[in-house]
Amino acid sequence: MKIVVAIKQVPARDSQLRIASSGQWIDEEDLTHEINEPDAYALEEGLQLKEKHGGEVVALCFGAARAAQTIREALAKGADRAIHIEEDNPGAHDPLAAARLMAAALQSESPDLVLTGLQSDDLGYGQTGPILAELLGLPHATIIMEVEKLDASIRVKRELEDGWFQHVEMPLPALLTIQSGISKLRYATLMGIKKAKTKEIRRLTPESLSAGNTAPSIRLERVYLPERAKNTQLFEGTPAEAAAKLVEKLKFEARVI
Amino acid sequence: MSILVVMEQRAGEWNRMSFETLAAAQQLAGELKTAAAAAVLGSGVDALATELAGKQLDKVHVVEHPLLAEYTPDAYSNALRQLLAHVQPDYVLFPHTYQVRDFLPKIATAMGKVAVSDVVGHKVDDDGLVLVRQLFQGKVNVDVRFAGDAPHFASLQAGAWRADQLAAGSAAVEKFAPSIEASAIRTKPGERFRESARAVDLSAAELIVAVGRGIKEADNIPLVQELADTIGAELAASRPICDAGWLPMERQVGSSGQTVGPKMYMAIGISGAIQHLVGMKGARTIVAINKDPNAPIFEVADYGIVGDLFQVVPALIEAFKKAR
């Protein structure tokens, strides 16, 4: 089974974010970056499916040059090779434009299964998977917690709201978006890190891909820190002082204890 | 100009979030000086259409087909595209449900569009409609404008508009029969199921202490458990804690877990991603303990301490004991 896993590099989760002076994006200069967490689970699922059924795992990444680090980590964990669509300003592409580039890069690959995380931690559209499925003409299912390969099809467990689930069956090739927590993430081994250095990374540019172009249908106008809707009473001082003030308020003002 | 709301139902039961979207559409219609209509897709949904006919709407479109009885992305997007070609709305609004997340990007893509997903607010200015959505798990907001030709697609977050502000009225019901081929439906959905009966009903809890990523490792959970025990609270968690197996799934609060409304909800080391907030923002008093002053949890918190939970929580346990 040939499995493509689309991964994205995003600012680390605990980053303190500042708005860029342009007001169009955040200042990414001093941030550390990491793999988008749901994509890490998609990669893990891809690797486990390969271990069970054989085949190949190809990591696909649309991102800036620094995303090479995230791609190396995917290779070190066990992906066989990678495709990096390199673009200095990936954020300037809306999800459809980004997916068009990814679909074009996959033209020559004909994967049996395409996996990606259910959403990104930065833009959070949660759309790249289903968009890519539509562009590639594949059936899809989103927010998947379990994948079982049958003969020429797969049976997946889809998460619904309020603790409900549903099994869905579909023919291969197909596309799935993977939910965080589907399994335990592996670490790269020393051997894996060593091997990764010799693995192939195909570098493509948006210009080299005939992705087709349409006028963007949305425009990000202004990025800003949310104004606080609520007036939170914050308690300062030493932990003991702050705790004492909080408990007093909970007892005498909110009257919840 | 016109607005169409695509309502969500399953087996003749509404997904209640649809009514928040309907209320938003009525409000937008007023501000943009246009009319709102609603659509419901399914099989045997006349009763639902009748209910919609009692709302202040231009029209109610009933999209009926036996193959819409069960949701599949292929049948739904196929039927809806046919309806859109017929109605030609400028704005198409959806509740941001799991189902909408599954098929909205598909339809939008087929029409060369990008949907603005998970919208939390809006403004109208001289240049038209601005939608507000969140980036970076709620840490940053962005204003988004539509460009190009209609239709423009958006899905609205749970709790962002209030369904109780829905205006009553009288709308004409119009039937629409899409043509759908069974052979074009590629996915086979099974029955819905739940893993196991929930042993813990957090929705009944008066006090909840909830723990998130900030707790760092499983070995630190007893610290928060002790805090919960001190005040007789139920222990709950954000998703990553349950994903990691540090607490059972039945203690998860959020869109994929339980929705709670206790007298007090104390969030320890929880940043407050949207998916968590929708499950707890109905709590009467919300307390947040977090080291990041910009964490979105502080946007819903009544009281807060910005600091290291490993120092604050032991201090709180002591303070609660003293207050007895």
Image: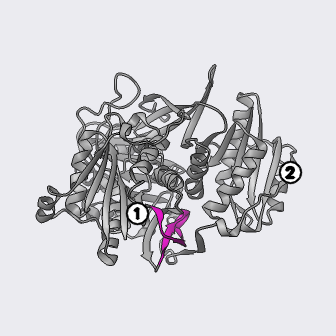
Residue B154 in sight = yes
Pointer 1 indicates a residue of which chain? A
Taking the spot 37% from the left edge, 39% from the top edge, the residue there is: A206
Is residue B199 positioned above or below B300 on the image? below
Taking the spot 68% from the left edge, 38% from the top edge, the residue there is: B91
Q: Quadrant of residue A91?
A: top left
Q: Quadrant of residue A244?
A: top left
Q: Which residues are magenta?
A: A152-176
The label shown at residue A111 is 1
Taking the spot 38% from the left edge, 67% from the top edge, the residue there is: A182
User: In the image shown, does A21 or B318 lie closer to the viewer?
Assistant: A21
From the viewer's perspective, is A84 left or right of A251? left
Binning the other alpha carbons within 10 Å of mark 1 as few (below 14), some (14 to 19) or many (20 upward) gives many
The label shown at residue B174 is 2
Residue B246 in sight = no
Amino acid marked by disc 1: Pro
From the viewer's perspective, is A72 left or right of A223? left
> Is A175 covered by the magenta stretch?
yes
User: In the image shown, does B93 or A237 lie closer to the viewer?
Assistant: B93
Name the quarter where the C terminus of chain B is drawn: bottom left
From the viewer's perspective, is B171 left or right of B275? right
Is residue A202 positioned above or below B145 on the image? below
In this view, the mark in front (2 or 1): 1
Dominant SS type (magenta):
strand
Rendered location of residue A62, percent (x, y): 35, 45
Name the quarter where the N terminus of chain B is drawn: top right
